C-alpha cells in the first residue's frame, strides 16, 4: 500500500479520464466487496400509516421521491430502504408493512433479518389502542433474539385538546412532568401493553413529524430524543455519518455519498479480495469524485484533478501519518490501513466539494491551502469512520 501511496493520485487521475482501464475486473471486485459489507439494519415494525416512512424521512433528510426510489421489496411483507442509495448503502431501513394484514406471518422476515438487524424500532400511533396482534408478532420476533427495542409513539397532536395547541417545550416526555392527563393516559397505557406482553423495550420515544402546512413550529418534534435513543443502542456515530450541515447545500447533499465511498474504500482494506491490477480503493475514489461532480452539476476536468494531485502528491499524504506510522502499523495492521484509506477518501471528497464551492465564488485555492484543508478533512474523516468501522469488527465477532 505505501509504495502505491506515492503515486496513487497519478493512478486516480488516469482512472478518472480513461475509465476503460477500469473494466470488468474492478466491477466484479466492487460487487463482491459490497456483498460482504455488514450493513446495519434498522428494522421498522408497525402498522400501515403508523409513521414508518416519516421516520426514515426525518432521520435521513430525504424527500418522498428520494425515499420512494430507494425502496426495494425483500420479502412478501417487507421492503428495504437503502441509504444513501442502493449502490452505496451504509445503513438499511427495513419497513414491515404487512402487520395489519390477517395473513401476516413474520417468519420470513425473521429468517432474513435476524442476523443483521441492530435495532428493532416499533412504530405506533399514540392514540392506537388496538395493538394486540402486532404485540403477538413482536413476541414471536423477540423469542430468539434480544433486539434493542425502541418504541416510537407518533402523531401525538391527535391527542391535543385544542387544535391550536403547540408542542410542549422543553420536550417533557423523558419524565412526563407537566404532560396533560389527556395525553399521558393513552401514551402510558400503550407502554403498559408492551410490559403486559413482556416485550423488553429499551426506550419509548414520543414524536410528531408533521408537514409544513400543519403549522407546528417544530415539524420534527421529538427527533432529538429519537436520535438519543438510537445512539444509546447503536453507538457508532451513525447520526453524523448520515447528515452533516455545511451551509453549502451541495456539500450537505454530497456528505452521505462521500461517507459511503469512504466506508467502502476502508472496507476494501479489511475484506480480503483477490489482487487486482488496479487498486480497488482508487477506483472507489474515482467513482466518488464523479458522483460529487454530478451533485454540483460540474464537470470534473483535468485542471481540477491536476491541481489537487499536484498539491497532494509526492510524500504529502504519506507525511499525514507522521510518527504514528512507525508506532501503529505493527499493532493494527489492516485496521490501521483501513482507517487511513477511508480518511483519505473522505478528505478527497470533501476537498472536491470545497474546491467547487470556492471556484463558484471566483476564488482559487493555492497549493498550500489545498494541503491544509486536506489535513483537516483527513482528521475529520478518521473521527467519522473509526466508530462505524468498529461496528464492523463487532459484527464479525461470533454472537454469543
Ligand atoms: N402529525 C403526524 N403525522 C404523521 C406522523 N407520522 C406520520 N404521519 C403522517 O401519517 C401518514 C402515514 O405516515 P407514513 O410515514 O407514510 O406511515 P407508514 O405507512 O407507517 O410508512 C402520513 O400522512 C404522514 O405524514 C407524526 O408523527 N405526526
Ligand atoms: Mg410507508
Image (cartoon, rainbow, N blue to C red):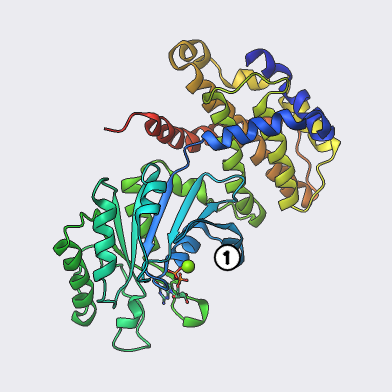
Q: Secondary structure at mark 1?
A: loop
For the residue pair 235 and 86, the one nearer the viewer reads as 86
Q: Provide the residue designation for mark 1.
A: 63
For the residue pair 121 and 299, the one nearer the viewer reads as 121
Residue 102, quarter of the rendered image: bottom left
**Residue at (80, 42) in percent of width and height:** 300
Question: Percent from the top left, x then y, of residue 272?
Answer: 55, 22
For the residue pair 353 and 26, the one nearer the viewer reads as 26
With 367 as the anchor, is 248 left or right in this view? left
With 225 as the anchor, is 185 left or right in this view? left
With 107 as the anchor, is 317 left or right in this view? right
State which quarter of the image contains the C terminus. Answer: top left
**Residue at (57, 42) in percent of width and height:** 259
**Residue at (69, 44) in percent of width and height:** 354
Question: Can you say whether 43 is above or below 212 in the image?
Answer: above
Question: Percent from the top left, x then y, of residue 222?
Answer: 36, 65
**Residue at (78, 51) in percent of width and height:** 360
Question: Percent from the top left, x then y, of residue 100?
Answer: 36, 71
Amino acid at each position: 500500500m505505501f509504495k502505491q501511496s506515492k503515486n496513487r493520485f497519478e493512478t486516480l487521475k488516469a482512472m478518472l479520464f480513461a475509465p476503460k482501464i477500469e473494466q470488468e475486473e474492478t466491477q466484479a471486485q466492487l460487487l463482491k466487496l459490497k456483498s460482504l459489507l455488514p450493513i446495519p439494519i434498522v428494522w421498522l415494525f408497525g402498522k400501515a400509516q403508523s409513521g414508518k416512512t416519516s421516520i426514515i424521512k426525518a432521520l435521513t433528510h430525504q424527500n418522498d421521491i428520494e425515499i420512494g426510489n430507494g425502496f426495494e421489496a425483500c420479502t412478501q411483507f417487507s421492503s428495504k430502504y437503502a441509504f444513501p442509495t442502493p449502490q452505496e448503502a451504509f445503513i438499511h431501513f427495513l419497513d414491515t408493512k404487512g402487520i395489519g394484514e390477517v395473513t401476516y406471518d413474520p417468519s420470513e422476515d425473521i429468517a432474513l433479518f435476524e442476523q443483521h438487524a441492530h435495532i428493532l424500532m416499533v412504530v405506533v400511533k399514540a392514540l392506537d389502542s388496538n395493538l394486540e396482534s402486532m404485540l403477538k408478532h413482536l413476541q414471536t420476533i423477540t423469542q430468539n433474539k434480544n433486539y434493542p427495542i425502541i418504541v416510537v409513539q407518533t402523531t401525538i397532536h391527535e391527542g391535543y385538546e385544542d387544535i391550536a395547541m403547540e408542542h410542549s417545550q422543553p420536550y417533557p416526555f423523558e419524565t412526563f412532568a407537566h404532560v396533560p392527563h389527556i395525553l399521558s393516559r393513552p401514551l402510558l397505557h400503550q407502554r403498559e401493553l408492551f410490559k403486559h406482553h413482556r416485550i423488553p423495550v429499551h426506550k419509548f420515544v414520543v414524536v410528531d413529524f408533521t408537514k409544513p402546512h400543519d403549522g407546528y413550529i417544530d415539524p420534527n418534534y421529538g427527533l432529538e430524543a429519537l436520535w438519543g435513543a438510537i445512539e444509546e443502542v447503536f453507538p457508532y456515530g451513525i447520526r453524523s455519518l448520515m447528515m452533516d450541515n455545511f451551509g453549502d447545500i451541495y456539500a450537505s447533499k454530497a456528505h452521505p455519498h462521500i461517507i459511503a465511498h469512504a466506508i467502502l474504500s476502508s472496507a476494501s482494506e479489511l475484506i480480503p479480495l483477490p489482487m487486482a491490477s488496479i487498486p480497488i480503493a482508487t477506483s472507489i475514489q474515482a467513482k466518488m469524485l464523479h458522483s460529487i461532480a454530478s451533485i454540483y452539476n460540474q464537470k470534473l476536468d483535468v485542471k481540477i484533478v491536476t491541481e489537487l494531485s499536484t498539491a497532494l502528491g509526492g510524500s504529502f499524504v504519506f507525511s499525514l501519518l507522521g510518527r504514528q506510522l512507525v508506532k501503529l502499523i505493527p499493532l493494527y495492521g489492516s485496521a490501521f490501513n483501513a482507517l487511513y484509506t477511508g480518511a483519505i477518501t473522505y478528505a478527497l471528497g470533501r476537498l472536491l466539494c470545497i474546491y467547487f464551492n470556492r471556484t463558484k465564488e471566483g476564488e482559487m485555492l493555492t497549493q498550500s491551502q489545498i494541503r491544509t484543508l486536506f489535513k483537516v478533512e483527513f482528521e475529520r474523516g478518521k473521527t467519522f469512520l473509526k466508530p462505524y468501522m468498529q461496528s464492523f469488527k463487532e459484527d464479525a465477532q461470533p454472537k454469543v
